[in-house]
Image (tube, helix red, strand yellow):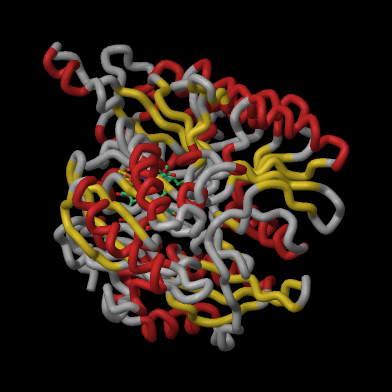
C-alpha cells in the first residue's frame, strides 16, 4: 500500500508551482540555454509539451562540448480525435515553420509536433490556440486526451460517444489560468484567489486516461485505460455504459512490481451519470494513489494494493449508490476499417493507413503535402484513430473522385495494397526524440515488417490479419501488451518478444523470449507461423492459436515485465 509520508520530487515541484506556473515564463526567455530548468521541465508537461533532444546528435554534441540539441514536442488536446481542415492546415504550417516538417498521429487520437526550439515554442502554441486547438493537460499528472471510438458512421451512438469524450475532457480539465498567462499573455486578475477545484495544488499522483468504446469495435483498447466506458446499445439507441477501472500498459524491465493490467469491469451506468462517475473515480485515485513512487502511482496499482472490492466500496460511499451489474457486450476487433464507408446519412468516410502515424513528405510519398491539398478542398472533418490512422470524414458522394485522385497522387492509397499485418501494426515514436527509448520502434517498423512479410508470404499468411505492435521500451506507448506479436525494446537492436494476445484487446500477451535480436525473433516466429498456417481452425486468430496449441500455456492477466 502507498506510503505517502515521503513524497516524490515531482510532488514537491507541483506543490511549489503556483498551479503549474513555476518559472516557465522566465525560462522561455532565457537565451543562455535551449532548455528549461528541471522543475519547469516537469511542469511544462501539464501544458502539453515535453523537453526532448535529438538523440541522433547527442554523441556528436557531447564530443563538441555542446549542450544537447534541446527541442520541444507539443501534443494537442483533441478529444475523440476530431480536427477541422482549417485546424489541420494550421498544424501543418506549424510543423513546417517551427517543427521537424512532420505531424505525428498518436495512439491517443491526437497530433504531436516534434522538434520545436525553445524560441519558437510560445509562437507555436499561440498559433494553435488561434485555430482553437489547445494542448492543456495533453501530458502531466492529470486527465489526458479522452479517446473515443473513431468510426463516425456505424450509428448515432458513435456521435454520442464523441460528444461524451468532449464533455469529459472539459469536465476534467484543470482550471488554472497558468496556460493562458504563459502562452497567451493573459494578465493575472489582481488579488484573485485561484483554486483548482478538482485536482488541488498537487494534481493527481500520475497520468489518468479515459476511453469510450462502441462495440463491436474496440479501436480505443478500452481495457488499457485507467477508466473505460463501453457503450451499451439497443439498436442504435445508447442505453448507457459499462464502467471499467484500473487498466494500464506501463512496466519497467526487471521490476515485477510493475506490470500491464487489463481494466476490470465494475458495473453499468446510464449516460447522465458518466461525468459524476468519471470524476469520482479520478478523485479516489487523487486521494489514494501512490505519491512517493511514481513507478507505482497509476490507478491499477491503487486497486491491486487495496483490492477491487475496496475500490468499489469507496466508489459506492462517494456516489451514494451502487453500480448495477454490467451489461453484455461483444468486441470483434481493435483495428480500423480502411477505405470508403458510407454513413447512415449518405455521407462518406475514407480511412487512410498512415504508417506508424507519421505524416511527412518522403521521396515518392509526399503525404504531408497530400493531406494539405485534401484539407484545402475538404468540406467535412478529419478523424484521428487510436490506431494512428486518419479518416477523411463527412464527404459528399460528389466530392469522392477529387479526393480519390489526391489520395492516389500523394501515395496515401497504400491501404489498398499493404499486407494485413502492416494494416494492423502500431509503433511508438521511440528514437530519436523519446528520451526513454531503449531501442528503435517507429523507424524500425517498416524494415521489420518487410522481413516478417516475406516469412508470412512463404507460409501463405500475407492476408492473415495478425496484430503486431512494437515499443521502444516497456512503457508500452503502442499498447504492445495487447498485440498477438509484440516487440518491446530492451537495448539497441534487442527486444523482448511477447506473444498471444487476442484480436480484440481483451487479453494480454505473454513474454516468449527475452532480449533477442531480429534474427532470433524471426527464427522463433517461423515455426509458429508454419504451425498456424497448417493447423489453424477456420477464422482462428494467431494469438488464439498459440494458446490452443499449447505453445504459450494458459493465459494470464498479467504479462511478465
Ligand atoms: Fe506514452 C511516456 C509517447 C501513448 C505509456 N510517451 C511517453 C513519452 C512522453 C516519453 C517521456 O516521458 O519522456 C513519449 C514521447 C515520445 C515522443 O518523442 O513523442 C511518449 N505515448 C507516446 C505516444 C506519442 C506514442 C505514439 O507513438 O503514439 C502516445 C501519445 C498519446 C497521446 O496523444 O496522449 C503515447 N503512452 C501511450 C500509451 C497508449 C495509450 O495511452 O493508449 C501508453 C500505455 C497506456 C498507459 O498509460 O498505461 C503510454 N508513455 C507511457 C508511459 C508509461 C506510464 C506508466 O504508467 O508506466 C510513459 C513513461 C512515463 O509516464 O513515465 C510514457
Ligand atoms: Fe518512448 Fe517507450 Fe513510449 Fe516508445 S514506449 S514512445 S520508447 S516511452
Picture residue at 50% right of the left edge, 67% below the top? 504
Is any part of residue 516 visible from this angle? yes
Whole-percent x, y for residue 90 in the image: 63, 25
Which residue is drawn at the image coordinates 68% and 71% (left, top)? Answer: 271
Q: Quadrant of the C terminus?
A: bottom left
Whether residue 368 sits left or right of residue 115 in the image: it is right
Which residue is rendered at x = 52% and y = 72% of the image?
Answer: 539
Residue 227 appears left or right of 83: left
- Given residues 455 and 110, the one toward you in this image is 455
x, y percent for residue 266:
49, 81
Whether residue 532 sits left or right of residue 228 in the image: it is left
Q: Which quadrant of the figure has residue 410?
A: top right
Which residue occupies the foreground of this view, 98 or 556?
Answer: 556
Which of the image's four quarters has the N terminus?
A: bottom left
Give me the residue at 62% from left, 74% from top: 241
Q: Where is residue 472 in the image (x, y as percent from the top left)?
A: 29, 45
Q: In which quarter of the image is residue 406?
A: top right
Amino acid at each position: 500500500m502507498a506510503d505517502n509520508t515521503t513524497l516524490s520530487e515531482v510532488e514537491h515541484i507541483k506543490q511549489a508551482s503556483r498551479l503549474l506556473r513555476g518559472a516557465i515564463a522566465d525560462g522561455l526567455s532565457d537565451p543562455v540555454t535551449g532548455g528549461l530548468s528541471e522543475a519547469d521541465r516537469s511542469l511544462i508537461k501539464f501544458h502539453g509539451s515535453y523537453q526532448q533532444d535529438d538523440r541522433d546528435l547527442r554523441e556528436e554534441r557531447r564530443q563538441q562540448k555542446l549542450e544537447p540539441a534541446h527541442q520541444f514536442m507539443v501534443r494537442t488536446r483533441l478529444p475523440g480525435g476530431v480536427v477541422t481542415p482549417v485546424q489541420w492546415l494550421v498544424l501543418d504550417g506549424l510543423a513546417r515553420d517551427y517543427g521537424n516538417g512532420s505531424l505525428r498521429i498518436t495512439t491517443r487520437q491526437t497530433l504531436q509536433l516534434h522538434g520545436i526550439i525553445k524560441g519558437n515554442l510560445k509562437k507555436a502554441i499561440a498559433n494553435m490556440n488561434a485555430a482553437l486547438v489547445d494542448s492543456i493537460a495533453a501530458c502531466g499528472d492529470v486527465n489526458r486526451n479522452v479517446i473515443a471510438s473513431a468510426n463516425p458512421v456505424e450509428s448515432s451512438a458513435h456521435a454520442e460517444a464523441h460528444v461524451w469524450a468532449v464533455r469529459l475532457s472539459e469536465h476534467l480539465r484543470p482550471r488554472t489560468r497558468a496556460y493562458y498567462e504563459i502562452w497567451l499573455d493573459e494578465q493575472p486578475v489582481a488579488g484573485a484567489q485561484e483554486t483548482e477545484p478538482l485536482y488541488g495544488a498537487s494534481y493527481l499522483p500520475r497520468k489518468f486516461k479515459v476511453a469510450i468504446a462502441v462495440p463491436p469495435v474496440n479501436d480505443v483498447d478500452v481495457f488499457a485505460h485507467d477508466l473505460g466506458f463501453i457503450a451499451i446499445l439497443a439498436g442504435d439507441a445508447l442505453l448507457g455504459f459499462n464502467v471499467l477501472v484500473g487498466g494500464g500498459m506501463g512496466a519497467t524491465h526487471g521490476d515485477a512490481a510493475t506490470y500491464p493490467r487489463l481494466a476490470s469491469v465494475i458495473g453499468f451506468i446510464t449516460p447522465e451519470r458518466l461525468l459524476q462517475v468519471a470524476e469520482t473515480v479520478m478523485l479516489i485515485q487523487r486521494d489514494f494513489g501512490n505519491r512517493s513512487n511514481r513507478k507505482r502511482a497509476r490507478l491499477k496499482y491503487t486497486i491491486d494494493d487495496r483490492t477491487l472490492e475496496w475500490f468499489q466500496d469507496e466508489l459506492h460511499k462517494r456516489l451514494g449508490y451502487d453500480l448495477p451489474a454490467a451489461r453484455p457486450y461483444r468486441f470483434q476487433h481493435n483495428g480500423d476499417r480502411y477505405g470508403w464507408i458510407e454513413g447512415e446519412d449518405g455521407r462518406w468516410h475514407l480511412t487512410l493507413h498512415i504508417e506508424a502515424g507519421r505524416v511527412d513528405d518522403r521521396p515518392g510519398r509526399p503525404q504531408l503535402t497530400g493531406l494539405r491539398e485534401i484539407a484545402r478542398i475538404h468540406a467535412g472533418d478529419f478523424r484521428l484513430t487510436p490506431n494512428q490512422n486518419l479518416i477523411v470524414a463527412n464527404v459528399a458522394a460528389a466530392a469522392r473522385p477529387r479526393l480519390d485522385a489526391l489520395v492516389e497522387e500523394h501515395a496515401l492509397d497504400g491501404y489498398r495494397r499493404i499486407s494485413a499485418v502492416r494494416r494492423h501494426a502500431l509503433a511508438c515514436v521511440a528514437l530519436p526524440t523519446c528520451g526513454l527509448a531503449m531501442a528503435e520502434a517507429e523507424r524500425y517498423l517498416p524494415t521489420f515488417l518487410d522481413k516478417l512479410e516475406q516469412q508470412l508470404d512463404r507460409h501463405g499468411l500475407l492476408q492473415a490479419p495478425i496484430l503486431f505492435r512494437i515499443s521502444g521500451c516497456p512503457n508500452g506507448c503502442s499498447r504492445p501488451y495487447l498485440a498477438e506479436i509484440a516487440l518491446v525494446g530492451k537495448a539497441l537492436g534487442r527486444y523482448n518478444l511477447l506473444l498471444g494476445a487476442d484480436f480484440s484487446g481483451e487479453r494480454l500477451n505473454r513474454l516468449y523470449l527475452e532480449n533477442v535480436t531480429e534474427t532470433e525473433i524471426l527464427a522463433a516466429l517461423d515455426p509458429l507461423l508454419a504451425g498456424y498456417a497448417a493447423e489453424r481452425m477456420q477464422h482462428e486468430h494467431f494469438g488464439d492459436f498459440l494458446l490452443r496449441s499449447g505453445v504459450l500455456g494458459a493465459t494470464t492477466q498479467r504479462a511478465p515485465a
